[in-house]
Amino acid sequence: MPAPLALGLAAGIALDALIADPRTAHPVAAFGGTAAALERRCWADSRGAGLAYATTLVAGCVGLGFLAERVPAGVAVCTWAVLGGTTLGREAGAMARLLEANDLAGGRKRVTHLCGRDPQQLDVAGLARATVESVAENTSDAVVAPLFWGALLGAPGLLGYRAVNTLDAMVGHRSTRYGRFGWAAARADDALNLAPARLTAALTVLLAPVVGGHPRDALRAWRQDGHKHPSPNAGPVEASFAGALGRTLGGRLAYAGRVEDRPLLGDGPAPGARDVARATRLARAVSLAAAGLAVTAAGARR
């Protein structure tokens, strides 16, 4: 008989596939509102204050996870709440249609649903590259990583990971305000994504034929270029996607009021509008494989 954790993960994965993220009253949005309110009360330009802030919020979510495991369908609800694969696929699909229609204005408006780059600095090619990179990174952050920690630690792992990842997105920036205060959240996110990001890259290598790529090319891009990215975890994922797609990612981007020149990842031409649909197909294949692995691993637990 399957373990309760495996059944809960499978049910939550099915819920995400069926109903995705609600437009309003999403649990992660509620957590973000709570985190923002607490930040206004306790912010200080110090690592200690940031550590206390992050620890309080993450501990609360982990505790909620322990309570959820005592409730029927609790693991399923937690799994649904932390997964974002279906919504990611829908947003990327919408971007693909806009870009294939050469709708620059629509693409600039829509890309804000996927990443924080300055849309006015992006042409159609830039929008395509931003979308492919976002699909790659979020396949790891919004699908593989929460399932990894859910299979390993159950509902506390699901909610604890999502709390850390959300805090990193909120305060983990290298800015004047968050350079010290967000340090703990950023480092915790790096640590929790270390294994899942490499699992995502490995699955991408294996599944490269889904988009007409070759595992050898995806592996070579990962090994040669993954370490060049400023993020220790986004690098392997984006590089393996670049190799699987036969495209080059990276380069100049405008983000949060600053311009960065990032190293190039992979070989081949820059991604175009049609590559967004290919990246989305690859992401779905990786997500499905990760779901199967998570449920299987959870079922093997005693």
Image (cartoon, rainbow, N blue to C red):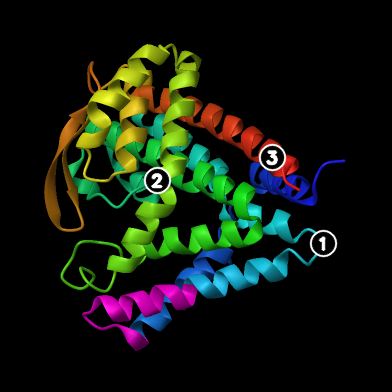
Res 93 visible: yes
Q: Amino acid at mark 1?
A: Pro
Dominant secondary structure of the residues highlighted in magenta in the image: helix
Q: Is residue 103 visible?
A: no
Sort mark 1 into few (<14), some (14-19) or many (20+) by Cα contacts within 10 Å.
few
Residue holding disc 1 = 72
Q: Residue at x 48, y 74 (%)?
A: 57
Q: Which residue is mark 2?
A: 194
Name the residue tied to disc 3.
Answer: 295
Residue depicted at 46% across the width and 30% down the height? 280
The magenta segment is: 41-57
Q: Is label 2 in a helix, a strand or a loop?
A: helix
Density class for disc 3 (Cα within 10 Å; few <14, some 14-19, many ≥20) is: many
Residue 2 image position (x, y, % from top left): 82, 42
Would you say 110 lies left or right of 174 here?
right
Q: Residues within 10 Å of mark 2 (few under 14, many from 20)?
A: some
Q: Disc 2 to disc 1, how far (Cα)?
A: 32 Å
Quarter location, residue 76:
bottom right
Amino acid found under the numbered disc labelled 2: Leu
Compared to 283, does 278 lie above or below?
above
Q: CA distance from mark 2 to mark 3?
A: 20 Å
Q: In this rendering, would 75 be left or right of 25? A: right
Mark 2 touches mark 3? (CB < 8 Å): no
Say which residue appears at 82% left-offset and 62% top-offset.
72
What element does badge 1 sit on?
loop
